[in-house]
Image: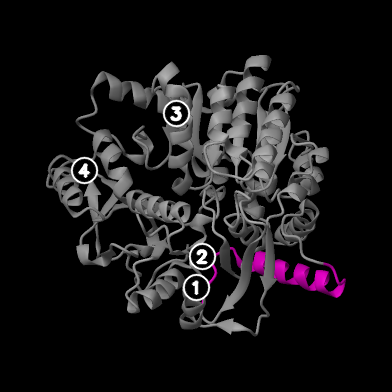
Amino acid sequence: MSTHIEVLLKRVDASETTLSLRKDLLDACLQTAQSEPGLFTLSAPTGAGKTLAMLAFALKHAKLKGLRRIIMVIPYLSIIEQTVSDYRSIFNDAFGDEYILEDHSLSDSGDKEGKEGGADDQGEHGARRRALAENWDAPLIVTTSVKFFESLFTNKPGRARKLHRIAQSVILFDEAQTLPSKLAIPTLAALSHLASSRYKCTVVFATATQPAFTHLDREVEKLGGAGWKPREIAPPALELFERARRVKVAWSKPDERLSWDELARRLEELPQSLCVVNARKSAQALSKEFSIKDRNDVFHLSTYMCPAHRKKVLDEVRARLKSGAPVRLVSTQCVEAGVDLDFPVVYRAFAPLESITQAAGRCNRNGLLSVGDVFVFYPEEDGYPKGYEQAVDITKILLKEIEEDSLDVDITSPELFNRYYRKLYDIARTHENQEIGDALDARSFVEVAKEYRLIKNNTVNALVPYDPAAFKSMRDEVEAKGISASWIRRARKHTINIYHNELDSRFVPIPVMARGRGGEESGWFYLGDETCYDLKLGLAESSGAHFG
């Protein structure tokens, strides 16, 4: 398996420096895998091959220490597909397709409490997949942060059924910086308990922008755990971040605002460029500036596009990057984590420091240029997703302090991120969710489950007409027969996640049973007005739309 992982790490054209960095990280993971179970961090720059390297760590560590399974926790649905594809290419031939279990809102595993599963799922294979999902009874689980953490804090028996399977596991967290700061302390305390001698888990937090969770050690310890004192897998002597400096960053002043028209003009002057903005409506506005000029080398990416749509865009963008053809990509922050792109120039609307660094990780990612260019700018009109404001303010304060000290801003520096996250958590603790602390003290499982929400405003699944023929077929089928696992399996690539408050008259609820036979709603919808889905931009913004 290690040989296969090494091959995957080398499959993308990269400089000798980058390939050497990836090999050193892989070797460090294999070496540290001999350590005793416990808490670990894996801090490595973007493009260093963290996702595969930590899998190699987990495989060897589980074998040496007698652990039962590996659980890969990923923050975004948008990056699960690539990870699972890589993992299946490693394991399926040798072990079959039941070696890896996907458990998330768009998987076909079924969820009784989520009312998924239906009349045509009575076959042996379907029943087997549902049993595996309900109990997490597979060697390798790939799930989302929402599924994993809310299962830890749930009061519902169906979701809690899998908890005993977590014991004696290697739990890998990709893009660990995405954990909400207001939930950090109870979350770390739960993971610290799992890493105790009672549950014998190993927990790994991997990211290029490692949060300063050790700053919260005492608060974590107060909740009854052993605190938060992880061991770093990649030794400082490797100097991974120093070796991975591949970009230079230019910072605009807050009063230097760019209109969408001016930004489009600048991007047009660059043969290949990526521009990341903070809101879907901003990405659509900028993309429309190019549409006016009827350009066919400009692409758009956001979570308002279904997985099949995003995949087609990314495949075309990668092909153009590889061939040297002109390509401009306008995207929301969905491109920042886990998406393997390598542009010579990146523009990033001002955002929290970790988002700026993640966007910069799509610039000169494979080190084929002597240096890539990153421009941080302030758009004339933009919005921040909910929860961004504090992190944006801290980023501004930190940059001002660095400027006053006449120092250069090294956005890859672990020391810089330690300083940034310490400030962020100090502020977050003044706004901490006291209700969950009280619920934990009172051992009120109902209140704990109510208060522990990674996404306060839950999302629903909506089938969209990216492929009109497939959309019509699936819509007619679900109206006639109701929800089923086989339908979900086909629909998942044509589905977007939207917030409850985005639902309007355009969306038609899908029943569990066939239309007209009664029964509960399934939590799934389809887009009733097909004209609201654009083949370039995805779902059209509504007046009540949410940022993201």
Closer to us: 253 or 126: 253
373 w.r.t. 482: above or below: below
Q: Which of marks 1 and 2 is nearer the N terminus?
A: 1
Q: Earlier in the sequence, mark 3 or mark 2?
A: 3
Look at 85% across and 75% down and name the residue there: 404
Residue, disc 1: 267
Look at 47% across and 55% down and name the residue there: 321
Residues at marks 2 and 4 touching, judged by CB atoms closer than 8 Å:
no
Q: What stretch is highlighted in magenta?
A: 382-407
Q: Earlier in the sequence, mark 3 or mark 1?
A: 3
Three-letter amino acid code of the residue under disc 4: Gly
Closer to us: 50 or 80: 50
- To which quarter of the image does residue 478 belong? top left
263 w.r.t. 468: above or below: below
Residues at marks 1 and 2 touching, judged by CB atoms closer than 8 Å:
yes
Three-letter amino acid code of the residue under disc 3: Ser
Per the model, the C-alpha gap separating discs 1 and 4 is 52 Å
Q: Nearer the viewer, mark 3 or mark 1?
A: 1
In this image, 244 relative to 404: left or right?
left
Residue, disc 3: 89
Per the model, the C-alpha gap separating discs 2 and 4 is 50 Å
Look at 43% across and 39% down and name the residue there: 104
